[in-house]
Image (spheres, rainbow, N blue to C red):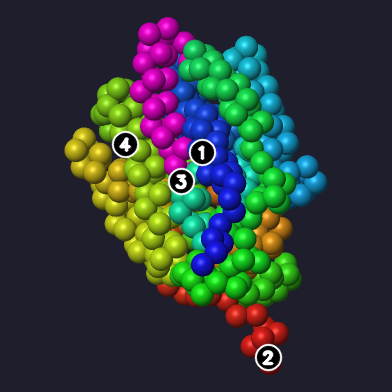
Amino acid sequence: MANINSPRKFYGWNNAALLFLIQFGASGFVYFAYSAIFPAMVEAMDWNRGSASIAHSLGFLMLGLFYPLTAWLIGKFGVRMTLTAGLLVMLTGLLMVIFLVTEIWQWIVVWGLIVGLSFSLTGPICGQTLVIHWFNIRRATVLGIFVTGSAVGGFIAQPVLTGLMEYYGSWQSGWMVSAVVIVLAIILTQFLINRPADIGQFPDNVDPNLAAHQDDHIAAQPRTYRSEHNWALGEVFKNPTVYYMMIIAITYLGIGTFIITHGALHLQDIGISKLETASLMGIFILGSGAGRIPAGLLGDRIELRWLVAAIMGVFWISFVLFSLTDDFVLLAITGFIAGTCYGGKFAVAPAMMSNYFGEESFTKINSTFAPLLLPFVAIAPAGAGYIFEAQGSYDLAFQIGSVLLGLSFVASILAKPPVRQTLAAA
């Protein structure tokens, strides 16, 4: 029986490893590093938490507003060029933060506009598009692998950056390390290959022309639902499933952003030391990493509707318990579990989108989906900051998050694979 795999070494796994390392730097040592460096900046310059958090909120708005541009650049120039441009913008922004920022308005402009633009250009859509091009059968698994890089980087960044800032007595030293890591990420990006066809290969290393004539090609079929059609944008937003998915996305991204932005400040407010706070934030990020590959593996075997419902249910319970305790051990346990759920949902979200609405439609749909939901996510950093300034605690922010998690659990159950109206009418 002929081998349906390409005889050449499959480059999809090289891409997966490169994306892991790029996310390790771009997300782990910039996005997740924010939770370690931002509190030091607030303390050093005596900033209002709400006003200073506008920068992160603005960054999310930029991420959403420029997602269509990112999608266009991917379609025009490919993932490699788009990601390179985004990393160069990110490096520029970090250098401006290090050498120029002394006032809160400068922080808002540089982090919110410049680094925010880089978040869009280096955002998950780049890696997700690349993985979806290269993998079908193991799609959710590989998505889980590549996004784990950001969590591993973030876990390492917390104690490293906190220790360096303590040693040098300067928050700028933390961002300097991040800038160096981004330079390395730019170099690694040049080795990415956009599509299998660019080097004469096929998704999953399976030649469809050979597979169609083999009895064992059935074993190479996906185990979970895949749409047989690539949905048009108008069709997608006529289906209720996309709105359930939007509720879930706003919730897990908003809560994750709240924890990254204000988690360290909350922990210090309730009496946790700075080093213990760094450990707890690292545990949350480690949990985020620990949940991604297992969620991806399960996402290729269990229908995503039920997997997401389980994730959001456990997230709900752990988040409530995290908000109610000041015991270090309980904070570590519930923080790790909450992080696992956050990371697991982050890993399977693009698989759900592409499985439900078609591989070729993914980038187009996601570039429209993101600008609609990210403005709501952007409320979390500044909103939580102003809640604290008004009430002296984050209690109301935790209560809002708990309600949203309950709604998302219900929405997950309702988010069944969509049926096209044209087919339903037939």
In the image, which is nearer the foreground, mark 1 or mark 4?
Answer: 1
Label ID, residue 145: 3
Q: In the structure shown, which secondary structural element does the residue marked by tag 2 occupy?
A: helix
- Three-letter residue code for mark 2: Ala
Q: Earlier in the sequence, mark 2 or mark 4?
A: 4
Using a 10 Å C-alpha cutoff, classify the residue at mark 1 as few (fewer than 14 neighbours), some (14 to 19) or many (20 or more): some
Q: Which mark is residue 17?
A: 1
Dividing the picture into quadrants, the one containing residue 406 is bottom left
Earlier sequence position, callout 3 versus callout 4: 3
Distance (Cα) linking label 3 and label 4 = 19 Å
Task: From the image, state whether disc 3 or disc 2 is nearer to you.
Answer: 3
Q: Amino acid under label 3?
A: Ile
Disc 1 to disc 4, C-alpha distance: 23 Å
User: Closer to the camera: disc 1 or disc 2?
Assistant: 1
Residue 312 falls in image quadrant = bottom left
> In what element is the residue under mark 3?
helix
* Secondary structure, magenta segment, majority class: helix
Q: Earlier in the sequence, mark 1 or mark 3?
A: 1
Residue 233 versus residue 108: which sits nearer the camera?
A: 233
- Give the numbered dot on residue 425: 2
Residue 205, image x, y percentages: 57, 54
Quadrant in the picture for the C terminus: bottom right
Label 3 crowd bin: few (<14), some (14–19), many (20+), radius 10 Å: many
Tell me the number on the disc at residue 283: 4
Give neighbour class at mark 4: few <14, some 14-19, many 20+ (Cα, 10 Å). Answer: many
Which region is colored magenta? 147-171
Q: Residue 174 in the image: state x and y as whole percent.
A: 48, 17
- For residue 368: magenta? no
Q: Is residue 120 visible?
A: no
Residue 419, quarter of the rendered image: bottom right
Say what amino acid the circle numbered 4 marks: Ile
Q: How far apart are the two marked residues, 2 and 4, measured between alpha carbons?
A: 50 Å
